[in-house]
Image (spheres, rainbow, N blue to C red):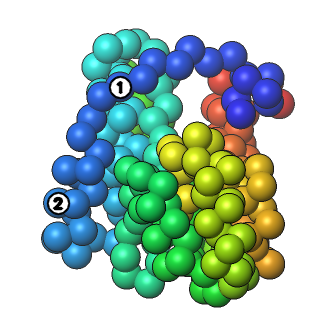
Amino acid sequence: MLENAGVHVEVQPVRIDEAAIRDAMVAEGASPRDIADQLAEFKARRASQKAPGDIVIGCDQVLAIDKRILAKPDSAAEARAQLDALAGRKHQLLSAAVIYENAQPVWRHVGVVTLHMRTPSPGYLDDYVTRNWESIRHSVGGYKLEEEGVRLFHRIDGDYFNVLGLPLLDLLAYLTLRGLIAG
């Protein structure tokens, strides 16, 4: 998304145990917003350790329905179960970004989108998961809004970029205000 916006970035994947961090925070009663923020910060901190003089952006996304946090499905059956849990209900996607500069956090933002899923027929959901498993296997909730998954929804409240996993507009505003990109 940043490259498409004309911002050159170097992607450096980092390894953190997202499940352990998320599960520990859930056990402590942390809010979905705090969980998304902390996961993004862990990633930014780890990447910053590898490139301490660089400006580093860490990001992560959490799906919350009621007080429950969903993770990426491990199987097509789990994706189908997540879709069943979301069907006919609303849920939130929280997309967090944290910027580290000189090994310190200097900016953070969590964008929130509320999605209202319609109640698709069981046959449609079965066929949807079968047709799209290779694409949705890495997507919490078992859908991708930028693909056929958009057909599962009747209303979306919030910034589309947050759905895609990055609070892009807020991030670009910060980078522009700091003079890090032309504006």
Q: How far apart are marks 2 and 1 (CA)?
A: 20 Å
Instruction: Out of 78 and 100, give the one closest to the viewer.
Output: 78
8 to the left or right of 67: right
Going by the numbered disc 1, the residue's amino acid type is: Val
Q: Which picture quadrant has residue 143? A: bottom right
Residue 34 % position (x, y)? 36, 63
Q: Please tell me which residue is depicted at 71% across the width and 70% down the height of the picture.
A: 124
Residue 36 % position (x, y)? 41, 56
Going by the numbered disc 2, the residue's amino acid type is: Ala
**Callout 1: helix, strand or loop?**
loop
Instruction: Out of 32 and 126, give the one closest to the viewer.
Output: 126
Instruction: Out of 128 and 157, give the one closest to the viewer.
Output: 128
69 to the left or right of 162: left
Residue 128 % position (x, y)? 68, 60
Q: Which picture quadrant has residue 68? A: bottom left
In the rendered image, the quadrant that contains the N terminus is top right
In the rendered view, tell whether residue 13 sits above or below residue 79.
above
Residue pointed to by mark 1: 14
Q: Which mark is residue 24?
A: 2
Q: Please tell me which residue is depicted at 19% across the width and 50% down the height of the picture.
A: 20
146 to the left or right of 67: right
Question: Mark 2 or mark 1, which has the lower sequence index?
Answer: 1
Q: Which picture quadrant has residue 3? A: top right
Residue 91 % position (x, y)? 56, 76
In the rendered view, tell whether residue 32 sits above or below residue 16.
below
> Alpha-carbon neighbours of circle 2 within 10 Å: few (<14), some, or many (≥20)?
few
In the rendered view, tell whether residue 11 sits above or below residue 59.
above
> Alpha-carbon neighbours of circle 1 within 10 Å: few (<14), some, or many (≥20)?
some
